[in-house]
Amino acid sequence: MSPPRTRSKLIGMIIYAVVFVTVTTTAVVFSVRAASSGTDLRSNLTYIAPAGVGGGWDSFAREQQQAMRSGGVVNNVQVVNIPGAGGTIGLSRFSTMTGQATNVMATGTAMLGGIELNDSPVDLSDVRPIARVAEDYDAVVVAADSPYRSIDDIVAAWKQDPKAVTWTGGSAGSIDHLIIAALALEVGVDPAAMTFIPKSGGGEAMQTVLNGTSDVAVTGYNEIADQVESGRVRALAISAPERLPGVDLPTLTELDYGVDLVNWRGVLAPPGITDEELAELKAIIEETRNSAEWQDALSRNKWIDSYLTDDEFAEFITQDQQRIADLIKELGL
């Protein structure tokens, strides 16, 4: 009889494989269609979101799509969703699109977490990073009638009993989960001892706060801004290094909690493309970033411009991957 942990890992690998086969079948159709349309990257581009419709990567990809179209950067852009395993199913499929420069894919913090959590055989060194484009930040949120009026209140209860506070956010190993882990380490709580209810996104996480299943949610501010403004929930702090324009929330660092984990969004190119094709894709992303349409998207979503490319982006990925690996190790995942 296999130990429970071994059986759990085996089951997880089987599920991973089944999902991979299912979702990538659709991706093959789209990628072949894109590849057969020619190599004029400004005529047709397929933008892969490695998550389901409505998630953070999907929103990012579709905002990029709209900015490319409206700004006249690319004539036709289609978004294809390949969800699963913290973005690593999409990354695995993308890594096989060798030489297909008409495909790009969204990436970011959650994918680095997915790589570590799923022990992915594929990482960002197997593709060609183009640029980091934007950052968004998580807010710490409670119900309007919550007894927790501040981060200090939460931390006091948490330190007294790590199980006393029930947290929620995205999937295990997500940026939401990692921010909670970083806060736990900051205040001396064992991250492996905390109670965390993983959800597929900010909407589901907020429902658990509103129905009392969880006490505190950590999720993207843009996902819950409407509920904060309506008074249904109270946001206590944001994970940004400094206050966001137009958002009246203190940062965790401002409140003397040294946590400012960034949820960054970037773009990847497939392996095997030429340097000329990579340069053209970089030009497309840079022109999109400089467009009025994209600047409007940044403002609407409370995203921060953080454009980075070339060697600086490669160095950033290496450092961020190590930081996330350390946090996941602390979580015992």
Image (cartoon, helix red, strand yellow):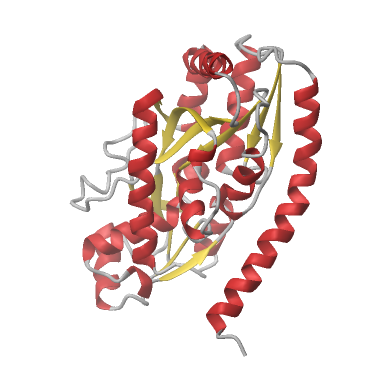
**Image height of 25 relative to 298, above or below:** below
- Residue 131 appears at what percent x and percent y? 46, 26
* The image quarter in which residue 281 lies: top right
- Residue 135 appears at what percent x and percent y? 41, 34
* Residue found at the very far top of the displayed protein: 72
Which residue is painted at 68% across and 44% down in the image?
82
Foreground of the two, 225 or 53: 53
Q: How many marks?
A: 0
* Res. 143 visible in picture: no
Question: Which quarter of the rendering shows the C terminus?
Answer: bottom left
Which residue is painted at 50% across and 69% down in the image?
212
Foreground of the two, 222 or 320: 320
- Residue 289 appears at what percent x and percent y? 49, 18
* Residue found at the very far left of the displayed protein: 256
* The image quarter in which residue 12 lies: bottom right
Which residue is painted at 50% across and 28% down in the image?
300
**Image height of 48 relative to 20, above or below:** above
Which residue is painted at 66% across and 12% down in the image?
42
**Image height of 113 relative to 101, above or below:** below
- Residue 165 appears at what percent x and percent y? 37, 71
**Image height of 138 relative to 61, above or below:** below
Question: Which quarter of the rendering shows the N terminus?
Answer: bottom right
Foreground of the two, 25 or 231: 25
* Res. 166 visible in picture: yes
Left or right, residue 101 beside residue 180: right
